[in-house]
Image: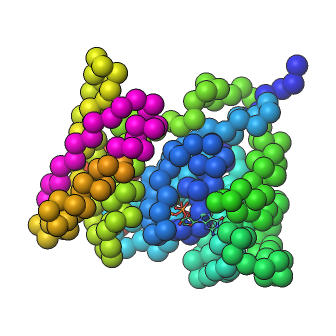
């Protein structure tokens, strides 16, 4: 009988690099939210993929950037924590943006933090956006800057190169028993996934700073006898004015958010969902430790 393999693969990179898109593709389901805006993912999210006899536990992380606020610092700490615990690190770099200052900073940090011969592979993502020559030059430059174990050219969105990456990762994980039941795809509680889905719909509809100043929590989850689920969620904002924007003219914005989120949550749980959203003004939520634990972040990581 073949030996099984299992281990953790952390996906790291700048905000918007496509980490969550890649996680979802690897897992074959949407377990981590995706938007075109930076800093979408706030905590570590694990998704489980099977590849032959190997179980790959992908760890999606918040993007790495220069943090300013407590929340930002806690997010970046969570991302590096995910990398530190992993068997293999995959650094995602956006093909069309190349070696930005942010990428330089990550390479520098990798050189400093990641020792003991940990395997780091490079995945140049969004190859659908550039020509082949650009890719080759970028790959050469990045490999000069850091000794990557391997380089992959992928499009997380379209799926190019993703199978090769998964096969390589499976072959390079340590031998050992699987870490999760074979049919489990995520280790995030359903109430948290449901809150994230609502936050995604809000982030897609709200502009400028507002997505970064709100959070969503599931307060109540009730399985009903008729097979449906009643879910109550709270959207925390920092100002009265924000509440008005989230509600929208005649409540249109919140209605649109609610419908879109409900449909997605219902698909995920495979049951009808009744979703009730409430907006609460909480000027200080970004400094409340309870909000951080609800997000799966360590409040103390945000201390300067
Ligand atoms: N063209 C193109 N777009 C992509 C690809 N992969 C991801 N995207 C887009 O890039 C944007 C960011 O994707 P995410 O998966 O949310 O990126 P992320 O790295 O998780 O971002 P943060 O959570 O903010 O750190 C989304 O609009 C995706 O649709 C790709 O291969 N090609
Ligand atoms: Mg993300």
The residue that appears at 34% across and 43% down in the rendered structure is 262
How many numbered circles are shown? Answer: 0
| Displayed-image quarter of ligand 1 | bottom right
Question: Magenta residues, as a range?
Answer: 262-285
Image-based side of 164 in relation to 99, left or right: right
Is residue 109 positioned above or below 256 on the image? Answer: below
**30 within the magenta span:** no
Query: What x and y, as percent, mark residue 75?
Result: 43, 59
Nearer to the camera, 35 or 187: 35
Is residue 256 positioned above or below 186 on the image? Answer: below
Outermost residue, left direction?
240
**279 within the magenta span:** yes
Quadrant (top left/top right/bottom left/bottom right) for the C terminus: bottom left
Query: What x and y, as percent, mark residue 214?
Result: 27, 61
Is residue 124 positioned above or below 60 on the image? Answer: below
Image-based side of 242 in relation to 151, left or right: left
Query: What x and y, as percent, mark residue 233?
Result: 25, 44
The residue that appears at 66% across and 46% down in the rendered structure is 26
Nearer to the camera, 245 or 260: 260
Outermost residue, right direction?
1
Quadrant (top left/top right/bottom left/bottom right) for the N terminus: top right
The residue that appears at 62% across and 38% down in the rendered structure is 48
Outermost residue, top direction?
225
Image-based side of 197 in relation to 222, left or right: right
The residue that appears at 71% across and 70% down in the rendered structure is 128
Give the quarter of the image for residue 107: bottom right
- Residue 289 seen in the current view: no
């Amino acid at each position: 009988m073949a030996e099984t393999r299992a281990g953790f693969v952390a996906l790291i990179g700048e905000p918007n690099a496509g980490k969550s898109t890649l996680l979802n593709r690897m897992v074959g389901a949407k377990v981590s939210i995706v938007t075109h805006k930076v800093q979408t993912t706030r905590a570590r999210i694990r998704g489980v993929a099977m590849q032959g006899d190997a179980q790959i536990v992908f760890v999606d992380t918040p993007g790495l950037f220069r943090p300013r606020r407590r929340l930002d610092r806690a997010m970046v700490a969570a991302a590096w924590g995910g990398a530190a615990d992993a068997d293999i690190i995959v650094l995602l770099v956006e093909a069309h943006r190349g070696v930005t200052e942010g990428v330089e900073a990550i390479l520098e940090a990798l050189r400093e933090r990641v020792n003991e011969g940990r395997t780091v592979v490079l995945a140049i993502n969004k190859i659908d956006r550039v020509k082949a020559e650009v890719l080759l030059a970028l790959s050469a430059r990045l490999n000069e800057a850091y000794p990557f174990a391997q380089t992959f050219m992928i499009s997380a969105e379209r799926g190019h190169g993703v199978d090769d990456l998964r096969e390589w990762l499976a072959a390079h994980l340590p031998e050992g028993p699987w870490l999760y039941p074979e049919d489990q795809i995520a280790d995030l509680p359903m109430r948290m996934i449901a809150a994230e889905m609502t936050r995604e719909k809000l982030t897609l509809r709200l502009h400028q700073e507002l997505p970064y100043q709100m959070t969503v929590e599931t307060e109540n989850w009730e399985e009903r006898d008729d097979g449906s689920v009643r879910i109550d969620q709270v959207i925390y904002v920092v100002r009265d004015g924000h509440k008005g924007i989230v509600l929208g003219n005649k409540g249109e914005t919140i209605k649109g958010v609610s419908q879109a989120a409900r449909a997605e949550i219902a698909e995920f749980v495979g049951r009808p969902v009744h979703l009730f959203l409430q907006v609460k003004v909480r000027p200080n939520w970004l400094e409340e430790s309870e909000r951080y634990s609800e997000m799966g972040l360590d409040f103390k990581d945000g201390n300067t």
